[in-house]
Image (cartoon, rainbow, N blue to C red):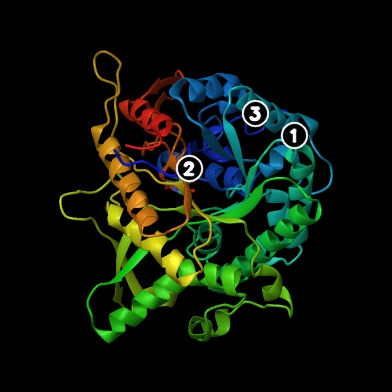
Amino acid sequence: MLQFPKDFLWGVSTSAYQIEGAWNEDGRGESVWDRFAHRPHNVADNHNGDVACDHYHRMPDDVALLKTLGMPAYHFSISWTRVLPAGCGAVNPAGLDFYDRLVDELLAAGITPMAVLHHWDFPQALQELGGWVNRASVDWFTDFARVMFNRLGDRVPLWATFNEPWVIAFLGYGSGIFAPGVCDYSQAYQTLHHLLLAHAKTVQLFRQDNHAGEIGIVLNPDHFIPATNRAEDIAACQRAYDENVGMFLRPLVFGEYPAQFMDWLGVHRPTIFPGDLAQIKGSFDYLGVNYYRTSTVTHDVGGGLLKAKIHSVSEPGWGRTEMDWGIHPAGLTHVLLDWKENYGNPKMMVTENGAAFPDAPDDTGAVNDPARINFLRAHIEATHAAIRQGANVRGYFAWSFMDNFEWASGYRPRFGLVYVDYPTQKRTPKASAHWFGRVAQQNGL
Ligand code: NOJ
């Protein structure tokens, strides 16, 4: 049996917009994802998060299910506009109460709550003031964080400021395939900088107010491999790495952006005020790793700002997921060892890992998903391999607790350990849910 270290934290993850639904109930304000998904052609099959998994109304039952499955921890995000409908100003008591009840239910069930302040559902009212491109966003976010710390800080031991700021910056403001749908790389890099600054100021606030517990940020590193050993592919690979990893970890760990890559950006370089980077440096207790892919990188003059073609690949024999992503467990070991060796071996948690497969109930109503069990097993083994080589990894969370709204891909891809029948909202734990619950309980496999 592969045994994990004592106090290793196991759990499952979700996010607010992907599961809650109740998009306009009890005073919730509009987010950029409401606006984006309500507009035709932005999301596959014109799906949206209006109802999603109806978790807002079913939360106590969902927490009871987490307990039945034996999940030690639960990683969820907070809908900013449920709490502050206009993004700033008046607090909506009903919204704040929802998260208060969620945390109490979790604690009563013996489940550790891990709260992410922001998982992409930015307030539409603030988008109209420029969104993350406006430097005032740093204060908007810290004001929201203050409200949450004051209400939940006494009971939530683990916090993250942002989930995957790379996605907000580059899919939200660069390619525009995600909300708010802006296609402008200058705005994307400005967003990146303001996200890191908002993160840093929020961590300062958390520390100044002496909240118990730890706070970090969740990144989404790919493992990148040059497609060949030609110098131009190696250089393109470095750019892909810098955009995805270096632009976040160098400022967070060393207080600087990667110099060569900043030169490459030319006119798209963000405006940085003196003192910003010094605040970003060291602003975390732990780092979250959402790992999904390993990608080869080829120099390609048609490859946008990076001049790179990025292609996700599988290890031999693994096939691909329903979203046509490669499956490459060893890439997770590489990522964790890269962070160990090149960024001072920070405290790390695998905060998301999982895959979409075409699951369906059989005649008896059971959902057997051996492909997901194999996927999770191999990635848990890859995490263990990194720990054996000295990586400071403290937890592993599977994405996702249940099937949910997969952003621009709508409801078709099913990432859940629990199957959701959307018309009836019936939850059926898949075989992987029972399997993973046992792994968590045994602290190993
Ligand atoms: C990362 C994101 O944080 C989550 O929202 C998404 O559903 C999963 N990856 C799968 O794509």
Q: CA distance from mark 1 to mark 3?
A: 10 Å
Q: CA distance from mark 2 to mark 3?
A: 23 Å
Pointer 3: residues within 10 angstroms few (<14), some, or many (20+)?
some
Is residue 269 visible from the viewing direction of this image? yes
Rendered location of residue 283, percent (x, y) = 66, 63
Rendered location of residue 105, percent (x, y) = 64, 24
First along the sequence among labels 2 and 3: 2
* Up/down of 63 relative to 176, above or below: above
The amino acid on which the numbered mark 2 sits, given as a three-letter code, is Phe
Residue 440: name its quadrant: top left
**Residue lying furthest right in this view?**
90
Identify residue for label 2.
Answer: 8
Who's the residue at 33% across and 29% down the image? 435
Quarter of the image with the N terminus is: top left
Identify residue for label 1.
Answer: 96
What secondary structure is found at the residue carrying circle 1? Answer: helix
Identify residue for label 3.
Answer: 102
What secondary structure is found at the residue carrying circle 2? Answer: loop
The amino acid on which the numbered mark 1 sits, given as a three-letter code, is Leu
Quarter of the image with the C terminus is: top left
The amino acid on which the numbered mark 3 sits, given as a three-letter code, is Leu
Residue 253: name its quadrant: bottom right
Pointer 1: residues within 10 angstroms few (<14), some, or many (20+)?
many
